[in-house]
Amino acid sequence: MPRVAITGLGFVTSIGNDRTAVTDSLRELKHGIALSTNLTDKDPISVLGTLKGFDTTSMDVEDWTYPSDYKIRREHLRSMSPHVLYAHCALVQAIADSGLDEHEVSSRETGLFTASAGSPRGVHFNIERMNNLGVGRVSPMAVVSSVVGSLSFNLVASFKIMGASGGFASACASSGHALGYAFDEIALGRQQRMFVVGAEDGNREAILPFAGMRALSPSKDPAAASRPFDKNRNGFVGTGGGAVMVLENLDAAKARGAKIYAELLGWGQASDGYNVAISHPEGHGLAEAMTRAMNASKVNPEQVEYINAHATSTQIGDLSEIQALRKAFPEHRPFVSSTKALTGHGLSLASVMEAGFTAIGMHENFTPGSANITTLDPKTEGVNILTETHTSAPKIALKNSSGFGGANVTLVMRAMD
């Protein structure tokens, strides 16, 4: 079966809007969380992982501002919501980073899978306008700019994608599923390359509803609000943005002299079958996903040196993953960290963003630590939580993701020699 390489990355995130800035933030453990002007004094939360250089607060795209490096045609901009803009910019970066030309991008051999929850603000605005003013006053772009699937609709059209395309919706495991099935497209010989895109608006309307679930941190301290595995963690910090990973047939990538960040060896998935919102407290589904991923990749647990954890900084979720790690690695103790301490939780964006972070570390020879831990939760005893940047890269790494309904995905990555 064809092997699968990672040949391009693009980022619009709270810790940087390009690979260079993101790499620096990961090395130095610099966070991108701040007191947010998108929130009100009446809201029970104060901080978000914030994007710099973008202003998408207006409902009129003509009022948006974004870096001048990106030249987006008006006909494309008018059908966007904020997350689509972020992803568009990240995809431009990833294409340039991979060295693909426009004929390779727009080819029957190139597909695109996406993950996003759509734009809650856009849906609300358009339905309210329809109810108050009548359907005739609703933009013709209302549906394609806001519903789940907007990311695929827009990017396929803007970049003239002609291969496989589609979107995934499994909450915080969404872009993990997108990466896994994109791997399959290449490994089964259906496509030569795949763009995998995750994006979220990350604004008040997208994040604040999680406060109703008591899942968000009420902290007013940006430097300490997101702290996975810390004894005193009190919820996650939301964020938005866009991240793109280019997957490519390894032989084809080598033949064209492409830069290769890492190899994607395989993946696995399993469900908890337990609760609509809460991970199984014993971590059964995630443990099974890790085991299946390693089996599919022909990797033994003793070979895994690092795990980029899903850990969002919630009491229940973090400890569920700890239990899963104990089951999947009963004797071996790989390094474990959660880069959500730096970015906040990107929801369906998280998997591809953090897989990208892992690939950067493997290529640049470092392993990012789990920041903001003041007092390590004693319930993590026996799990090797990495609290500082490690100055060498893992040869084999896992990326875990978990979503509502107990959906769990694990990706296996290998550094290139």
Image (tube, rainbow, N blue to C red):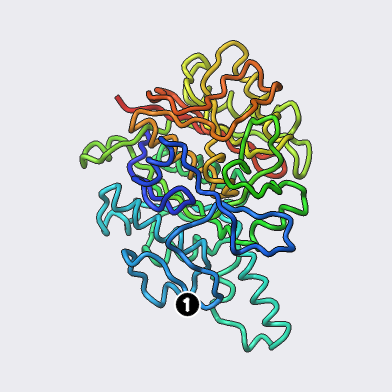
Towards the viewer: 108 or 178: 178
Towards the viewer: 412 or 311: 311
The residue lying at 43 percent from left, 70 percent from top is 65
| 351 versus 14 height, above or below | above
Q: Residues within 10 Å of mark 1 (few under 14, many from 20)?
A: few
Residue with the mark numbered 1: 63
Query: At label 1, which amino acid type do we have?
Result: Asp
Q: Can the viewer see residue 410?
A: no
Label 1 SS: helix
| 199 versus 123 height, above or below | above
Quarter of the image with the C terminus is top left
Could you tell whether 34 is left or right of 95 in the image? right
Furthest residue in direction top, as rendered: 331
- Whole-percent x, y for residue 286 in the image: 64, 30
- Whole-percent x, y for residue 376 in the image: 64, 25
The residue lying at 52 percent from left, 61 percent from top is 83
Could you tell whether 131 is left or right of 126 in the image? right
| 226 versus 101 height, above or below | above
Could you tell whether 310 is left or right of 18 in the image? right
